[in-house]
Structures are given as structure tokens and as C-alpha cells.
Image: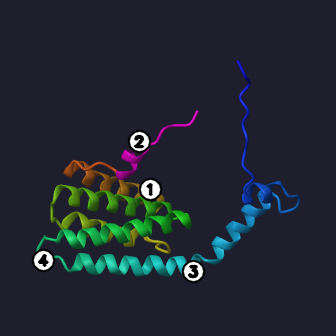
Amino acid sequence: MKPVMTFFPETRLAKLAARPGGIMRDIAIEKAKEYLESMRGEGDEAIRQMMDEIEKIAAGAQGNRLPLARIKDVLRLADQTVTLAGTFDYDPFGRCMKSLCDVADGLLTAGIEDAAPIVVHVRTMRLVAPGSTTLSPEQTEVVLGELAKILTHYDFKSLGSEADAQTPIAR
């Protein structure tokens, strides 16, 4: 049996990585964290704007009915907010917004135009928003636990749990 010969193409990235110099990984990570921190004000402002938009959509509900197109807008805005919450380490707020994404996706999937679960999340997002000091950590956990009951009530699945179940675990 002949030995198998493997050839690795020379790419620009491979050449750059092989060059001497550069900065240490830990220093690069620290500089990246500093850069992100310098952007926190802009991130907080973007979060406030998206929260305002979500509130306007919820306030536009007629009775307890919110059209599916508007629920889709809530999902889009909440998803963007989850990204910013994760970027700036706003954990309780991010969990609230993930729950809102799960509810909005469940409503869309089921074709239900119910505004009530959206409105509850909108009220909660203000309680756990960045800069909010209205709840203790224990109270925050209770409130977020109550949001989880909404998913159970509607029998909606968490988008994150589906993605986790489909992602193979590297060993």
C-alpha cells in the first residue's frame, strides 16, 4: 500500500500566521474587551431604541390582538437585542429577550395573534433592562421564572433548546 501524501495549499492567512511578530493572545483579548467596553454607550442607546420600538408595537395591539406581521417585527427586534445583551453581558435582560423571541416565534408558528404574552414581556424588559435598579437578583430570578411559565402555557419550545439539540457536541 502506497503512503498517502497530503498537501496543504499556501493561503494568505497561512502565510500571515507563520510570520513572526504580532501580539500575545491574552493581550489581544484584553484589547478587544477594552474596545467593546468603549462601545457600551452606543450599545445601550441601540438597546433603548429597540425597546422603544417593541413597546410601540405592543401598544398598537387592538384589544388583545397583534397581527402576525407585527409579531414578526417584535421577533426581529428582540433577536437583535439578545445579541447586544450578550455582547455587553446583560444576562437577566438577555434572558428576558430570549424568552420574548421564543414567545414571538411560537405565536408566529402557531398563527396566534395574541398580544398578552408580548405585553407581559415588554413590561418585564423594562424591569431588567440595563441600568434598571428596581429588582434584586432574587426578584429577577422569580420574574424570569414566571416568564418561562408563558412558554409552558402555550406549549412553545425554546429556540435555544432546539438549536442546542441539533448542534453536535465535540468530544
Q: Residue at x 76, y 63 (%)?
A: 28
C-alpha separation, residue under disc 3 versus residue under disc 4: 35 Å
Residue 38, percent from left and from top: 65, 77
Circle 1 packing at 10 Å, graded few (<14), some (14-19), many (20+), is few
The residue that label 4 is drawn on is 62
Label 3 close to label 2 by CB (< 8 Å): no
Which numbered disc flags the more N-terminal residue, 3 or 4?
3
C-alpha separation, residue under disc 1 versus residue under disc 3: 27 Å
Label 4 close to label 1 by CB (< 8 Å): no
Q: Residue furthest right?
A: 20
Which numbered disc flags the more N-terminal residue, 3 or 2?
3
Q: Residue at x 16, y 65 (%)?
A: 114
The residue that label 2 is drawn on is 166
Q: Residue at x 63, y 71 (%)?
A: 36
Q: Which residues are magenta?
A: 159-171
Magenta highlight: main SS = helix
Q: Closer to the observer: label 4 or label 1?
A: 4
In the rendered structure, which amino acid carries the disc numbered 4?
Gln
The quarter of the picture where residue 142 lies is: bottom left
Circle 4 packing at 10 Å, graded few (<14), some (14-19), many (20+), is few
Q: Closer to the observer: label 1 or label 3?
A: 3
The residue that label 3 is drawn on is 41
- Quadrant of the image containing the C terminus: top right
Q: Residue at x 32, y 62 (%)?
A: 100
Q: Closer to the observer: label 2 or label 1?
A: 2
The residue that label 1 is drawn on is 138
In the rendered structure, which amino acid carries the disc numbered 1?
Glu
